[in-house]
Amino acid sequence: MEQFVAVKRSKDGQPVRYLVVDDSVFARKNLARMIETFGGQVAGEAGDGVTAITEYERLKPDIVLMDITMPQMEGIEAAEKIVQQHPEARIVMVSSVGYQENIVAALQRGARHFVQKPVKAEVLYEVIKYVMGEDGTAAQAAGAGA
Amino acid sequence: MKMELIQPFINAADAVLAQGLQCPTSVGNLSMDEEAYRRKGVAALIWVTGDIEGRIVIDLDPATAVRVASRFAGTELPESDDLVRETVCELANQVIGNAVTSLNDQGFNFRVHPPVLHTSEHGPKSSEDTEAVVICFETPVGNVFLNIALRHNSSRQPERTAAVGQ
């Protein structure tokens, strides 16, 4: 898999911490592999919206990657509940169901961005940089590319 | 079943398989199936409800499922690995999600339910008056079968016609 220039937190230069929410173990592993190539760290995982809310409270990640179609509580509802409590939460919806109504609903209820599955690493990388904004910085690791 | 319902699934499966396997695929045999669904190997089933109702099954023989899952995971997986079944479910999720996105752009509104692993030998039909279309996708790692049994939800037809006509 392609290696990207690491995206770090501007405030302390530490890796960006992610909460990955998807009912598919395969999808979570796939996203975790991509996060690794972005120089990020998977702080936690969740398989449904309810667990995502409790894990967000516990971990306070920099970014949440959130699926939409999940058992118990769907991703858009979970995103809304997280953002109600934490307006600063950066939530990126990652779903195969990418029609306009879904995207608009997700954005209106607090998500920052939307990425359609199958996820292309280069697309997700650009979205991560955009969503982190000034709170993130892409910097070549020492010795990388040597 | 109308071709306008089937084509988005063919396009989505072709695109998702080609990207995941990093190789071209081709549509092979296409047939109609009026019998109850008979599983070939590792199968994931997804129900859709709304303007269109029914179910879609993605089915691979066990050896093909391992090869496909290994390609998607980027590492060799053993046949016993749960990740093989997980990958088939996620493959179904992505194909159906992308097809639904396309159909929604055409004015159909419906809900996709989470994929479930289909373990019984015989599967459900979506209704008594729905026949299934079975499409075989030929890939370098084996054949992937898409079994689609969908029908327009007649109780929602006037609703949709009104919405499209606005």
Image (tube, coloured by chain):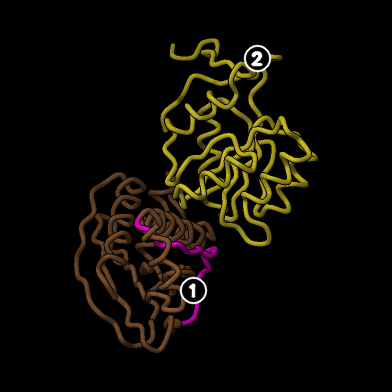
- Picture quadrant where residue B108 is located: bottom left
Q: Which chain contains the residue that carries disc 2?
A: A
* Above-or-below relation of B103 to A59: below
Residue B142 lies, in percent from the top left, at 28, 61
Q: Residues within 10 Å of mark 2 (few under 14, many from 20)?
A: some
Chain that appears brown? B
Q: Position of residue A23 (x, y in %)?
A: 60, 55
User: What type is the residue that disc 2 sits on?
Assistant: Ser
Farthest residue to the front: give it: B166
Q: Main secondary structure of the magenta part?
A: loop
Q: Residue at x 41, y 29 (%)?
A: A2
Q: Is residue B80 visible?
A: yes
Q: Quadrant of the N terminus of chain B?
A: bottom left
- Disc 1 is placed on an element classified as strand
Asked whether residue B66 is in view, the answer is: no
Q: Name the residue rendered at 58%, 15% in the picture.
A: A137
Q: Residues within 10 Å of mark 1 (few under 14, many from 20)?
A: many
**Quarter of the figure that contains the C terminus of chain B:** bottom left
Judging depth in this view, the residue of B118 and B63 nearest the camera is B118
Give the labeled residue for mark 2: A10
Magenta-tinted stretch = B106-120
Q: Which chain is yellow?
A: A
Residue B153, percent from left and from top? 43, 76
Is residue A91 depicted above or below B94 in this figure? above
**Residue bearing mark 1:** B118
Q: Residue at the location (68% across, 49% down)?
A: A78
User: Circle 2 sits in a helix, a strand or a loop, which is it?
Assistant: loop
**Residue A1 on the magenta span:** no
Q: Residue at x 37, y 76 (%)?
A: B151
| For residue B153, above or below residue B94 | below
Q: Nearer the viewer, residue B148 or A79?
A: A79
Q: Position of residue B18 (x, y in %)?
A: 29, 49
